[in-house]
Each structure stands twice: as structure tokens, then as C-alpha cells.
Amino acid sequence: MHHRRSIRLKGYDYSQAELYFITICCQYRACLFGKIVDGKMICNDAMNNRIQPFHNT
């Protein structure tokens, strides 16, 4: 069985409170969560509903 190599930094505590950058890739690069305007992400309702719980923690 093949095991993937971890891309996490060795010795880094990922349980600490920090901001993290994530990348979400959608099939055919569909814009499912909003659009980019002047280099900034403008989230649509679908994305806002998914990220809102994280803002309440």
C-alpha cells in the first residue's frame, strides 16, 4: 500500500490558534464560492455559509 508523504512542517504545533491559507480546487475550475475582484476574494452565500462557523470560534 502506498502512503502519501506529509507536507506538514516537522515540529510545528498545528493545534495552536493561527490563520491558515487553504486552497480549494473545484472540478473544471468552476467558481463555486465567489469571484476575484481587484485581487480580492468576494465570497458568495455558499462560501459565507461555510466559513461563518469558523468566525464564531
Image (cartoon, grey):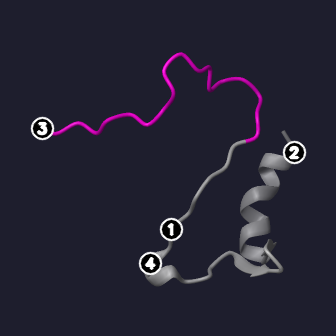
Per the image, the residue denoted by label 4 is: 27
Q: Which mark is residue 37?
A: none
Per the image, the residue denoted by label 3 is: 1
Q: CA distance from mark 4 to mark 3?
A: 27 Å
Which numbered disc, 4 or 3, marks the residue that appears first in the sequence?
3
Q: Which mark is residue 25?
A: 1
Q: Amino acid at mark 2?
A: Asn
In this image, 10 relative to 35: left or right?
Answer: left
Q: Badge 2: how crowded within 10 Å, few (<14), some, or many (20+)?
A: few
Which numbered disc, 1 or 3, marks the residue that appears first in the sequence?
3
- Picture coordinates of residue 29, whole percent (x, y): 51, 80
Q: Residue furthest left?
A: 1
Which numbered disc, 2 or 4, marks the residue that appears first in the sequence?
4
**Element type at marker 4?**
helix
Image quadrant holding the N terminus, namely top left
Disc nearest the viewer among 2 and 4: 4
Disc nearest the viewer among 1 and 3: 1
Residue 46 versus residue 11: which sits nearer the camera? Answer: 11
